[in-house]
């Protein structure tokens, strides 16, 4: 069973046993988390599809925060031509790794 979930403005396709990288969630490592914004659910062959309007009622995905980390460095360049102005800055976004444990559709 696959599910499309929405978390912090992004959509992810998840399956039980997957590990996904998301924007930082404010939980410690090992904390359990429940995502109830499930947009779509379908089986392996795509024969049985449940579409939410916009979310599926009583559907949830249970996951565990596996790790909190920093992502790869992102470089941002400011540049103005003819003025000899150029600035380069970079940052590493905070990310969380989530282990998907269970997908429940309709309770």
Image (cartoon, helix red, strand yellow):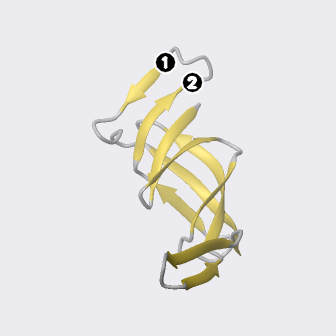
Asked whether residue 107 is in view, the answer is no
x and y, in percent, of residue 94 in the image: 62, 75
Mark identifier at residue 43: 2
Q: Quadrant of residue 88?
A: bottom right
The total number of labels drawn is 2
The residue lying at 48 percent from left, 84 percent from top is: 83
Q: Which residue is mark 1?
A: 48
Q: CA distance from mark 1 to mark 2?
A: 6 Å
Residue at the extreme left of the image, as rendered: 53
Q: Quadrant of residue 55?
A: top left
x and y, in percent, of residue 29 in the image: 68, 74
Residue at the extreme front of the image, as rendered: 82
x and y, in percent, of residue 81 in the image: 49, 75
Q: Nearer the viewer, residue 71 or 13?
A: 71
Mark 1 vs 2, N-terminal side? 2
Asked whether residue 71 is in view, the answer is yes
Q: Residues within 10 Å of mark 1 (few under 14, many from 20)?
A: few
The residue lying at 62 percent from left, 22 percent from top is: 44
């Amino acid at each position: 069973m696959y599910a499309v979930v929405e978390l912090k403005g992004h959509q992810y396709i998840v399956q039980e046993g997957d590990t996904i990288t998301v924007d930082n969630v404010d939980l410690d490592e090992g904390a359990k988390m429940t995502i109830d914004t499930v947009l779509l659910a379908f089986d392996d062959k795509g024969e049985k599809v449940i579409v939410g309007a916009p979310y599926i009622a009583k559907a949830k995905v249970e996951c565990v925060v596996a790790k909190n980390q920093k992502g790869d460095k992102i470089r941002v360049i400011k540049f103005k031509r003819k003025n000899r102005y150029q600035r380069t800055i970079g940052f590493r976004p905070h990310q969380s790794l989530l282990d998907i444990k269970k997908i429940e559709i309709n309770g």
